Amino acid sequence: MKLALGFSVLIATLLTIAHASDPSPLQDFCVAINDSKAAVFVNGKICKSPNMVVAEDFFFSGLNKPGNTSNPLGSKVTPVNVNQLPGLNTLGISLARIDYAPYGLNPPHTHPRATEILVVLHGTLYVGFVTSNPADPNLKNKLFTKYLYPGDVFVFPEGLIHFHFNVGHENALAFAGLSSQNPGVITIANAVFGSDPPINKDVLTKAFQVDKKVIDYLQAQFWMNNN
Ligand SMILES: *[C@@H]1O[C@H](CO)[C@@H](O)[C@H](O)[C@H]1NC(C)=O
Ligand SMILES: *[C@@H]1O[C@H](CO)[C@@H](O)[C@H](O)[C@H]1NC(C)=O
């Protein structure tokens, strides 16, 4: 009996570890606090003592202000995750405002820890995501795309490569909900061609099946981060 219980606890623990999303909270809240001297690290941030918690810990202001899109991508993401709003710690949710200049692009990227649900408030966005590699090697990664207008909502499943492109003549505005307190962003071009130190050219030349000069060119670019 004891052994069976121990075994099921072990299985439950393994299942919890294998689950990629944020863990469910085990208390009402766990307001994040910076404590560089703390000897313990949890899966997230350390909790502030509940009797020190104030309403400001659950509050963020300024998402009415447009992000500065004067950059080569013509887009700017303003995140509100646990790093900006400490009350989000352990709650498995966050938010972002995304501004797009005309023809601005939020370039192909993934959130390793979150599904994203996007709502468009102004403008026209061409958005899409690509599925992971199919089990059948004869099939390809599938692209799903959609044109979005004000009021439209689109969901990008967790971890998949996706993009938002403003195809209108005017500024566009969208807000995204994300199923993690700390979704993370991997911008594909930046991670692959702009890493520090750079990925070995032989690796990229073979991976992309191109001439080494193409890799030299790509690695020499400035890959800006719009987050
Ligand atoms: C925690 O520390 C980081 C880096 O020092 C800082 O940017 C952030 O604002 C701090 N967060 C809080 C909630 O104090
Ligand atoms: C926006 O960013 C550009 C480029 O960094 C900068 O020159 C400009 O002053 C910024 N505008 C505002 C309103 O902050």
Image: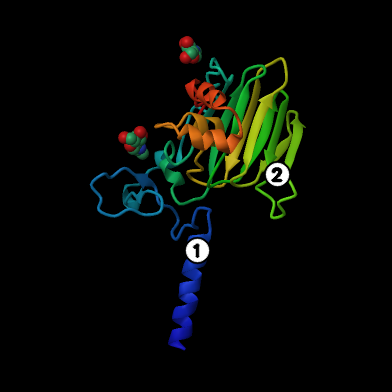
Residue drawn at (40%, 51%), measured in percent from left and top? 30
In this view of the protein, which residue sits in the foreground, 120 or 139? 139
Write down the residue under mark 1. Answer: 16
Of residues 34 and 185, which is closer to you in this image? Answer: 185
Q: Is residue 121 visible from the viewing direction of this image?
A: yes
Q: Amino acid at mark 2?
A: Asn
Q: Nearer the viewer, residue 152 or 203?
A: 203
CB of mark 2 near ligand 2 (< 8 Å): no
Residue occupying the far left of the picture: 37
Q: Which mark is residue 141?
A: 2
Q: Of the residues shown, which amino acid type is indicated by label 1?
A: Thr
Image quadrant where residue 130 sits: top right
Q: Residue at x 75, y 50 (%)?
A: 138
What residue lies at 51% left-to-right and 34% top-to-bottom?
A: 192
Q: Position of residue 45 (x, y in %)?
A: 37, 48
Label 1: element kind: helix
Cα gap from disc 2 to disc 1, whole angstroms: 29 Å
Q: Is mark 1 within 8 Å of ligand 1?
A: no
**Measured along the vertical axis of the image, is residue 192 above or below residue 141?**
above
Question: Would residue 79 be visible to someone looking at this image?
Answer: no
Among numbered discs 2 and 1, the one appearing first in the sequence? 1
The disc label shown at residue 102, or none: none
- Local secondary structure at mark 2: loop
Q: How many marks?
A: 2
Q: Position of residue 27 (x, y in %)?
A: 43, 59
